[in-house]
């Protein structure tokens, strides 16, 4: 149980384009999903907390207009990196909290974004 | 002071030995504590969680929590080469909404 998927697993795009990453909870309904970014040899950095049906809460320093988050259903949250630049190249990972264990986060496999 | 601190530097242990990882946290009100394992290039995988003071065992893993001293540790018994990974300590954060604060991680290298 508590399986989280992400799509795509890897994406390469040109600078200036937008990229959408999907995060799905496969066997449970996730009221809260989280988006993280991880640069090489660094720890996870929380970007935003996403609650179904409401606006995401962004961490300080994260541009909400650049990283658009939509959590339209209890099983799907999307992160769109708009007008991507090479410095946005990173490993983006989502996680979801399962009902009954709200502070336990299960991670998706991650999406490696490379912006040329 | 960082919310969650882990010892720096890789930990090398011979196969079959015990690996010991420590983590301290700053918020005395934290209630939930987690250990995640992250292989290179992969996302974190939950291996243990602990809520109460004392020890919690799951297979070769034992988590130890001491809220008075604000530390949580992870022991890996009979270390295997497949245990070579980075281990992340996570604690419920100050600001609620089930946010977790992560430490920087401890790299463990099990030498065959």
Image (cartoon, coloured by chain):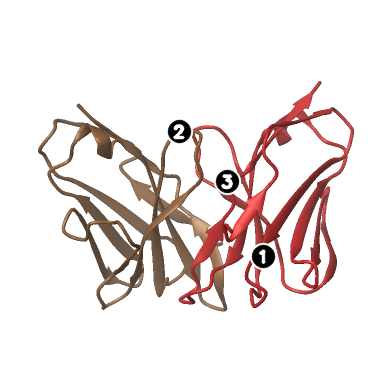
* Residue beneath disc 3: B104
Residue B16 placement: quadrant: top right
Estimate the spatial distance between the alpha carbons at disc 3 and disc 1, rounded to whole Å: 15 Å
Residue at disc 2, secondary structure: loop
The chain assigned the colour brown in the figure is A
Q: Is residue B46 left or right of residue B77?
A: left
Identify the residue at image location x=72%, y=72%. Answer: B51
* Residue beneath disc 2: A40
Q: Residues within 10 Å of mark 2 (few under 14, many from 20)?
A: few
Identify the residue at image location x=49%, y=68%. Answer: B99
Please identify which colour was used for chain B in the image. red
Identify the residue at image location x=82%, y=35%. Answer: B79
Q: Nearer the viewer, residue A87 or A72?
A: A87
Q: Nearer the viewer, residue B66 or B44?
A: B66
Contact (Cβ within 8 Å) of mark 2 with mark 3: no
Please, which chain is the residue tagged with disc 1 on?
Answer: B
Q: Is residue A49 left or right of residue B96?
A: left
Give the quarter of the figure containing the C terminus of chain B: top right
- Residue A27 visible somewhere in the drawing: no
* Residue beneath disc 1: B33
In the image, residue A25 sits, relative to residue A114, either above or below, namely below
Please, which chain is the residue tagged with disc 3 on?
Answer: B
């Amino acid at each position: 149980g508590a399986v989280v998927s992400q799509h795509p697993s890897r994406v390469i795009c040109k600078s200036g384009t937008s990229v959408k990453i999907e995060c799905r909870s496969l066997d449970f309904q996730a009221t809260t999903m989280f988006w993280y970014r991880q640069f090489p040899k660094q720890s996870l950095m929380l970007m935003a907390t996403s609650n179904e049906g409401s606006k995401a809460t962004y961490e300080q320093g994260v541009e909400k207009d650049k990283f658009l988050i939509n959590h339209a259903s209890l099983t799907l949250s999307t992160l769109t990196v708009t007008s991507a630049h090479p410095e946005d190249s990173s490993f983006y990972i989502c996680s979801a909290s399962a009902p009954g264990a709200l502070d336990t986060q299960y991670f998706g496999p991650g999406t490696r974004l490379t912006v040329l | 002071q960082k919310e969650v601190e882990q010892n720096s530097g890789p930990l090398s242990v011979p196969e079959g030995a015990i690996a010991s990882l420590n983590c301290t946290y700053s918020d005395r009100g934290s209630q939930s504590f987690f250990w995640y394992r992250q292989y290179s290039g992969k996302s974190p995988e939950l291996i243990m969680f602990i809520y109460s003071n004392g020890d919690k065992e799951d297979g070769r893993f034992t988590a130890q929590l001491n809220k008075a001293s604000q530390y949580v540790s992870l022991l890996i018994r009979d270390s295997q080469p497949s245990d070579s990974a980075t281990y992340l300590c996570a604690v419920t954060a100050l600001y609620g909404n089930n946010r977790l604060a992560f430490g920087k991680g401890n790299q463990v290298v099990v030498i065959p």
